[in-house]
Image (cartoon, rainbow, N blue to C red):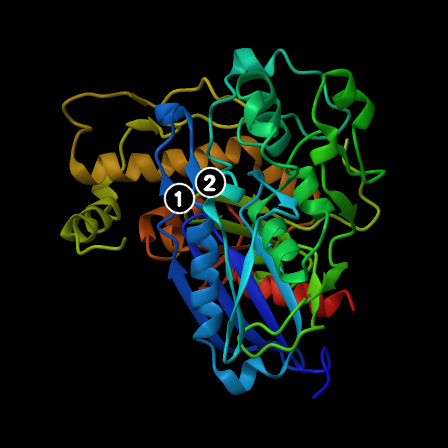
Amino acid sequence: MAAGEGNLILGIDIGTTSVKVCLVDPNNKQVLSKQTKDTQANVPSDLGSEGNKQDVPKIISALNSCVSRLPKDQLKQVGRIGICGQMHGVMLWSNKEDKKAWDCIETYMGCRFEIPKENVSALYTWQDTRCERSFLDTLPVPQCHLPTYSGYGCATLFWITRNRPDKLERYNRAGTVQDFAVAMLCNLDHPIMSVQNAAGWGYFNTCVAEWNSDILQGASFPTHLLPHIVKSGAIAGTLDRPWYGIPSGTSVGAALGDLQCSVLATMQKPDDAVLNISTSAQLAYVMPPQFEPNIQCPAKIWDTVLSLGGQDCAVSSLRVVPTLLGERHVPEQNASILNVDPGTLGLGQVFQAVCSGLIENLYGMMPRQMLVASNIERIIGIGSALTRNKVLQKQVQEWYKLPVDFMSGGDAAMGAALAVVECQ
């Protein structure tokens, strides 16, 4: 079989806590095989709780492990690769001749990628809060529809430029971890980034698909680190060499955002909205084409709180604001508990109030009126934190008063595979 002529799609999702891969038959959009592995990649930050970093070699090791465990006969049939991953974060690497960011170790089934730790920075994730409001207020105003928040790639690079400038002397490339994976697979000299990930970095005008280069240069931002931009779904390159049986020359799509791919894998109709609650919580729906934006462990406590929280007697005036870490648009917002009295402190009542507070927080950012105005008729609920929690499900229904279906879905790896199929 010639390279790139296979009839299967490999989907990859490089998430915040794990890597997931799957092989999809594009003819019926069915998943044939899948693997997942926790990355255990978190590393201590010198900034304490304000920093959130991950070990890139561990992430790529998990990716190698997942792919290597897929059926060998199916890997030989892969004709395209789609990749997505955790959005907003940033990592730096070197592509200098004497300091390459990746090595290819030959195996009997093709190469395995290894990452010299000294040639890559840590991954500064979307959860990084080093860019406090006082720091963000010193940055130039972006020309884009999204404000810049802590954890966004450009904000983190601004912080590194001003506080760790020596780090920029060690590396000459930057991107999200999924962009790095694409560059590694295709042996790209310069990283390629889709408009989805670029929008998640800040300082990117989605209407014209360009970085705010003039604004960034005027603020002494290292613009030479910015990736080249392509449309979402575009092919970034081809597999540079065989990879666990996948032929060299196989097309690799530009990396996409995990949220978008989760929505793509879940939506059944244009008037569906998708609510995902897992590591984080998001509510999303697809805008029309003409739109332009201005460790699981046994714990019986869960059985108890789910039971008590679902009882009618648990309903009370107790109110919980659950934003312990704030929100991007209000990072200074703290968590709080209101209306506390001797009659509202039952375990079931507290749990019910926490669940209500979680959905109320989402509702404040995207209320029912916004969904209705966009002709949304149904919410599809996904994510383990939602599909396993009947109390949380009830709160979704009570707050939004729309038909809600809860299902196992949101497979971002599958969505990444489907995105490559649909854009051919």
For badge 2, the amino acid type reads Trp
* Quadrant housing residue 62: bottom left
Crowd band around label 1 with a 10 angstrom C-alpha radius: few (<14), some (14–19), many (20+): some
| Element at label 2 | helix
The residue located at (53%, 15%) in the rendering is 133
From the viewer's perspective, is residue 100 above or below residue 25?
A: above
Q: In the depicted view, which residue is nearer to us: 153 or 26?
A: 153
Crowd band around label 2 with a 10 angstrom C-alpha radius: few (<14), some (14–19), many (20+): some
Q: In the depicted view, which residue is nearer to us: 404 or 173?
A: 173
The residue located at (65%, 15%) in the rendering is 139
Percent across and percent down for residue 18 are: 42, 55
Percent across and percent down for residue 208 are: 85, 38
Query: Label 2 belongs to which residue?
Result: 399
Q: In the depicted view, which residue is nearer to us: 133 or 353?
A: 133
The residue located at (64%, 35%) in the rendering is 201
Q: Is residue 228 left or right of residue 246?
A: right
Query: Label 1 belongs to which residue?
Result: 395
Percent across and percent down for residue 226 are: 72, 36
* Quadrant housing residue 173: top right
